Structure formats: structure tokens, C-alpha cells
């Protein structure tokens, strides 16, 4: 049930060649409980792993990696308007999106092609193209790693924020999210407010909106801009877009009139971190087998054989340079181990 000295290379989309001292893949809740009752679990630090698409290993993991592979998609309740569906945390997120589109359930089409698994979707309240998971999230089941009990978190318990939740803060490392319940709409209500989607739909000649057409547009945009992790190692956006006060934004704009930013609540602005990094001259920079992606400055890449430490150090140099040029503190979005 628990293996020793397992390579993690195929379990992280950066493709970093490190290993775990101990490794187990959980197929169900009983498997998780058995692992957490074991001596190996009690004596070692633990990492819960999903698809490995939002983390960077900077060294071997000297503990127990518990990969969540719990499957299943089950309808709990259905009305004329909504469906409540419970999904195993180990289900691949994009497979779930395709399942919803197939069934005519709306709400996750803008989140098409995000790598990773369902169990990690609430971790950072995944978001893209104007939609966040919190909009369709109903409840989750999580196994408490000390007691083995199942605890339930409703939407308000998760304290969802911009790429953030209670699981990255107050209860960090305490739970394995085993199943997630989403509330999806059976009525069409598509969000194409994000300029790029409208433009893409137009380019594709699509006039009749459907979850499928919105998903197709999102997939086409993503494939044209983002590196495919199966070909070039990466973990998506390495940094979060910083949220600053209106007055900070005003002083940045005085110096950099073209700064790209969007309103983010009362008196707050979200700066496009990709723009800041590009202006600081990092876009496309390559250092041997790693660097900053040529089309998207937010994405750091491993062209093959780079170490996590090299990529981490590059991210530190970028943080310093953005602070120096714009006076802005960027934060890493990717989880570092
Ligand atoms: P992992 O990388 O395995 O884990 C991430 C963190 O969550 C770790 O700290 C891990 O310990 C924890 N964790 C994972 N599963 C569980 C669980 N079941 N219980 C408790 N803790 C857990 N993100 C977006 O929000 N929007 C995007 O548009 C987006 N685009 C991306 C594009 C690319 C090309 C890539 C490579 C990544 C992108 N990401 C995006 C980031 C990433 O795909 C998401 O954050 C995804 O939800 C991570 O899922 P995962 O299963 O791979 O998590
Ligand atoms: P983009 O469309 O080039 O836009 C650049 C930035 O401006 C984005 O980060 C986005 O913020 C913001 N933005 C653009 N239009 C906006 C609008 N109408 N309202 C509010 N904010 C707007 O971005 P991209 O890099 O190609 O990514 C497209 C989408 O996929 C984004 O939502 C992005 O977050 C998501 N994505 C996420 C990851 C990840 O790893 N987290 C990786 C790739 C793509 P937001 O990021 O807040 O949307």
C-alpha cells in the first residue's frame, strides 16, 4: 500500500526529476484512513498530491506523498433548474468539465482545459476567463488527516478569495479533500464578458452560444497561448496578479501610463502580473534548459532536465526586479516543496 523511493517526475507537470521517500495512491476513503493510521504516516511529513500541476519540487520529498485518486461522478439531486453532483477528488478536472457539457450542465465551461484534479479545485478557487469555482461550488468532503473523520465545508466555510481559500491558510495541510459537490445550472447563462472569448467565438463563426461552443473557444485560446505541460514542463501562472489600492495604482499609472489593470472591488485594482514581468524584460528569457515562456511571461518553463531550485531562483530574481521597477510585491501562486 505504501511504496518506497518513488520518482515524482511523471507526477508533476513541471517534470522535475525528484523522488518521494514514501508514496501511496488512494483509491477510496478507506485507503486514506489506512494510510493515516500507519507508522509511516505518523513518523513522516505528508504531501497530498493531485495532478501535480500547481507545485514546484525544489528537492526530493523526504516524507510520504499521498496521491488522491478517488473516482466517481454521482448526481445527488436534480430539479428543473439545477443539478447537484458529487465528484471524486481524483477525477481529472477537464474530464469533469467535458462530462458536464455532455449532460447539458452549465457553469464550468469557462474553466475548460485547466490541468489538475477535482480535489484541488477548491484549494486556490481555480479561475479563468471571468469565472471562479466558488460560483458553482456547493460543498466538499475532506478527511481530517489527524482523526480520519470526514468534515464538511460549505461555500462560506471555504473563505474563497482570489486564487485562495481556507485550505491555503487557516487549515493548511490538515485535510485531504476527498469529494466535491457542485451546483450546476440546467439553464443557459454563459459568461463571455472576457474579451478574448467573444473575439474567439466570432473568429470561429459561432453565433449560437452553448456550453460546448464556449468551451471550444476557451480551449482554442488556451492552446494558442499556453505551453502544453506534456511537451514543455510548467505549472501555469507562476505568480498571482497583485491586488493594489487605487492610490498605489494611480501612482504606478503616472509613471507607466500603459499599465494593464482591472477593477477588483471597492478602491482596489488587479494588476496584470504578466504585463509587469514583460515590461521588466523577462518574457522569453532562456537560461539553458529553463526560462520564462515566450508567449506568456507569467509562465516559467522547464525545457527538460532543469532542477526545481533553478526555477525557484529564477522566480526570486523576477520578484526582486518587479519590486525594484514598480514597487509591487508579486506573490508566487505555485506551491513550493
Ligand atoms: P496539485 O498541483 O497536485 O496540488 C496543488 C496544491 O493543492 C498542493 O499544495 C497540494 O498539496 C494540494 N492538494 C491537491 N489535491 C488536494 C486534495 N485532494 N486535498 C488537499 N490538498 C490537495 N489554475 C487556475 O486557477 N486557472 C487556470 O486557468 C490555470 N491554468 C493552468 C494552465 C496550465 C498549463 C497549468 C500547468 C496549470 C494551470 N493552473 C490554473 C494551475 C493548476 O492547474 C490548478 O491550480 C489545479 O487546480 C491544480 O490541481 P492539481 O490536482 O494538479 O493540484
Ligand atoms: P489574458 O487574457 O492575457 O489577461 C491578462 C490578465 O488580465 C489576466 O491575468 C486576467 O486576470 C486579466 N484580465 C483580462 N481580461 C480581464 C477582464 N475582462 N476582467 C478581469 N480581468 C481580466 O490572460 P491569460 O494569461 O491568457 O489567461 C487567460 C485566463 O486563464 C485568465 O483568467 C487566467 O487567470 C487563466 N489562466 C490561469 C493560469 C494559472 O495557472 N492560474 C494559467 C493560465 C491561464 P485573471 O487571471 O484574474 O483572470
Image (cartoon, rainbow, N blue to C red):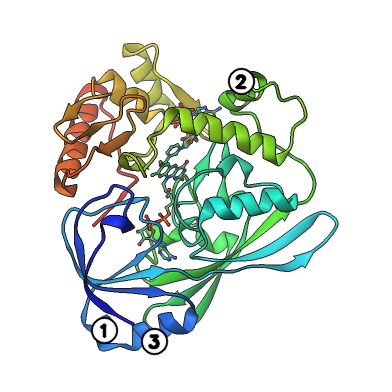
Identify the disc placed on residue 42: 1
Q: Ligand 1: does it lie within 8 Å of the C-beta at label 3? A: no
Q: Secondary structure at mark 3?
A: helix
Q: Secondary structure at mark 2?
A: helix
For the point 85% across and 56% down, the residue is 80
Q: Position of residue 240 (x, y in %)?
A: 37, 39
Q: Quadrant of residue 147?
A: bottom left
Q: Characterize the local packing of mark 3: few (<14), some (14-19) or many (20 or more) Cα atoms within 10 angstroms.
A: few
Q: How many marks?
A: 3
Q: Characterize the local packing of mark 1: few (<14), some (14-19) or many (20 or more) Cα atoms within 10 angstroms.
A: few
Quick one: 78 or 245, which is closer to the camera? 78
Quadrant placement of the N terminus: bottom left
Q: Ligand 1: does it lie within 8 Å of the C-beta at label 1? A: no
Identify the disc placed on residue 310: none
Q: CA distance from mark 1 to mark 3?
A: 12 Å
Identify the disc placed on residue 199: 2
Q: Is residue 188 left or right of residue 241?
A: right
Q: According to the image, label 3 marks what residue?
A: 34
For the point 65% across and 25% down, the residue is 201
Q: Is residue 269 visible?
A: no
Q: Earlier in the sequence, mark 2 or mark 1?
A: 1
Q: Quadrant of residue 216?
A: top right
Q: Are marks 1 and 3 in contact (CB under 8 Å)?
A: no
Quick one: 195 or 242, which is closer to the camera? 195
Q: Secondary structure at mark 1?
A: helix
Q: Are marks 3 and 2 in contact (CB under 8 Å)?
A: no
Q: Is residue 52 left or right of residue 139?
A: left
Q: Is residue 314 visible?
A: yes
Amino acid at each position: 500500500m505504501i511504496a518506497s523511493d518513488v520518482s515524482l517526475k511523471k507526477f508533476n507537470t513541471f517534470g522535475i526529476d525528484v523522488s518521494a521517500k514514501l508514496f501511496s495512491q488512494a483509491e477510496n476513503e478507506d485507503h486514506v484512513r489506512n494510510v493515516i493510521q500507519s507508522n509511516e504516516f505518523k513518523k513522516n511529513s505528508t504531501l497530498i498530491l493531485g495532478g501535480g500541476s500547481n507545485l514546484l519540487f525544489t528537492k526530493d520529498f523526504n516524507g510520504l506523498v499521498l496521491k488522491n485518486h478517488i473516482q466517481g461522478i454521482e448526481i445527488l439531486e436534480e430539479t428543473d433548474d439545477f443539478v447537484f453532483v458529487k465528484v471524486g477528488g481524483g477525477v481529472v478536472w477537464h474530464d469533469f468539465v467535458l462530462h458536464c457539457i455532455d449532460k447539458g450542465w452549465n457553469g464550468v465551461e469557462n474553466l475548460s482545459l485547466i490541468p489538475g484534479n477535482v480535489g484541488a479545485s477548491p484549494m486556490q478557487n481555480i479561475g479563468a476567463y471571468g469565472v471562479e469555482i466558488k460560483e458553482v461550488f456547493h460543498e466538499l468532503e475532506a478527511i481530517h488527516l489527524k482523526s480520519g473523520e470526514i468534515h464538511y465545508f460549505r461555500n462560506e466555510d471555504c473563505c474563497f478569495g482570489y486564487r485562495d481559500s481556507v485550505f491555503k491558510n487557516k487549515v493548511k495541510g490538515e485535510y485531504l479533500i476527498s469529494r466535491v459537490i457542485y451546483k450546476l445550472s440546467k439553464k443557459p447563462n454563459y459568461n463571455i464578458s472576457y474579451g478574448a472569448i467573444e473575439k474567439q467565438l466570432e473568429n470561429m463563426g459561432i453565433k449560437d452560444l452553448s456550453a460546448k461552443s464556449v468551451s471550444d473557444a476557451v480551449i482554442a485560446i488556451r492552446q494558442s497561448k499556453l505551453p502544453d505541460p506534456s511537451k514543455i514542463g510548467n505549472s501555469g501562472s507562476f505568480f498571482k496578479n497583485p491586488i493594489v489600492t487605487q492610490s498605489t495604482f494611480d501612482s504606478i499609472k503616472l509613471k507607466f501610463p500603459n499599465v494593464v489593470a482591472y477593477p477588483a472591488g471597492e478602491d482596489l485594482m488587479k494588476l496584470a502580473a504578466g504585463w509587469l514581468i514583460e515590461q521588466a524584460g523577462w518574457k522569453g528569457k532562456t537560461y539553458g534548459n529553463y526560462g520564462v515562456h515566450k508567449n506568456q511571461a507569467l509562465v516559467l518553463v522547464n525545457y527538460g532536465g532543469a532542477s526545481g531550485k533553478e526555477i525557484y531562483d529564477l522566480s526570486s530574481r523576477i520578484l526582486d526586479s518587479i519590486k525594484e521597477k514598480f514597487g509591487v510585491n508579486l506573490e508566487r501562486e505555485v506551491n513550493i516543496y
